[in-house]
Image (cartoon, rainbow, N blue to C red):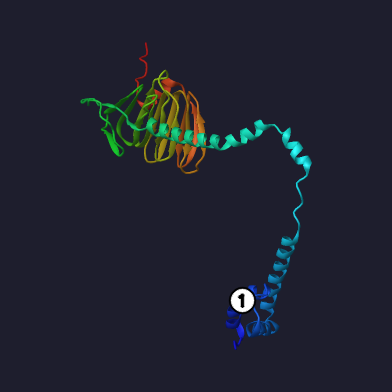
Amino acid sequence: MIRYAGSNACRRIEPRLSALAAGELSGDTAADIRAHLEQCPRCQETFASLETLGAKLTLLKETPIPAVPRSLFAGLRVFPWWLIRLASLRRWLLAASGLMGVWLAILGLLQWAGPLPVNLSSNATQQATPHLPAGTTLLAKPGEAVSLRLPHGTLTLQGPGALVIRSAALGKLRHDPRLDLNLPSGTLEIKLDAQGPPHGLTLTTPQAILRLAGTWIFVGTNAVETKVAVFEGEAKLTTIAAHKTYRLTPGQLAQVQAGWLSLHQIPLDEWLQRKGLIQPAASE
């Protein structure tokens, strides 16, 4: 005979409750389980739930299935079969859209899979079209200018300064370059051909992140300040400290210092003179 006491008894009883509710147990086993149920409220609740579920299943089996009305067949005869054909074609449309997505992803990888050719020159030297791998750092000494001649554009770093090439790729389909640059110090002049393909150019300084869509932009930066002047095109500037984005238009000079941004409208000649890029006009 099985004796039941406490939680150990419940663990032995619970697997047999469903068989008892279905009428599959008899004799001493069934009597012992029912004796335990008289003393255990938790098992009583579980057994009652199983009996209720069994009764519902029995009722469901005994419920007759109604016959299909003749009006349904009459309605199917006039149903627009082109809708059924369209539904059957749905899986083919889904498969075609999936293949199209894969194809577009492959095209995207091919678009930026080629290295970007660059003609690198300085005041004294000139190299023949190298490819700048990620991590390349260009240094310009005081008074030195290092130029990167890109397809449809030029970047000129005025020393003292440094420019880090994070990534540089040329699109194989449209030959549009994409660059991700870091300018920790120095002045960078960006001149891109407005008639050429679009450029994806991202420039990071210690104070800001710039996404440039312009054709003539100056960026000057050091450890505490970043200045951006847009002469043609536009630039989106996001401050690193406050993570706020501003749109700069031609003729605007943005100054980011200690996370704060101020905008000025400065004439082109005056700003170039202030940076020392051109000499003031001689007075008559």
Q: Which residue is farthest left?
A: 124
Q: Which residue is farthest top?
A: 284
Q: Is residue 237 visible?
A: no
Residue at coordinates 44% horizontally, 27% vertically from top-left?
A: 229
Q: Residues within 10 Å of mark 1 (few under 14, many from 20)?
A: some
Residue at coordinates 71% horizontally, 73% vertically from top-left?
A: 48
Residue at coordinates 69% horizontally, 79% vertically from top-left?
A: 41
**214 or 270: which is nearer to us?**
214
Tag 1: residue type? Arg
Question: Left or right: where does residue 196 sit relative to residue 34?
Answer: left
Q: Is residue 80 visible?
A: yes
**x, y (%) of residue 59?**
74, 63
Quadrant where the C terminus is found in the figure? top left
**182 or 193: which is nearer to us?**
193
Q: Secondary structure at mark 1?
A: helix
Question: Left or right: where does residue 237 sit relative to residue 69?
Answer: left
**x, y (%) of residue 223?**
37, 41
Question: Left or right: where does residue 58 sit relative to residue 136?
Answer: right
The quadrant where residue 164 appears: top left
The quadrant where residue 279 appears: top left
**x, y (%) of residue 121?**
25, 26
**100 or 187: which is nearer to us?**
100
The quadrant where residue 201 appears: top left
**25 or 143: which is nearer to us?**
25
Q: Is residue 283 above or below residue 138?
A: above
Q: Is residue 114 above or below residue 6?
A: above
Quadrant where the N terminus is found in the figure? bottom right
**x, y (%) of residue 128?**
22, 25
Q: Is residue 33 above or below residue 166?
A: below
Which residue corresponds to mark 1?
16
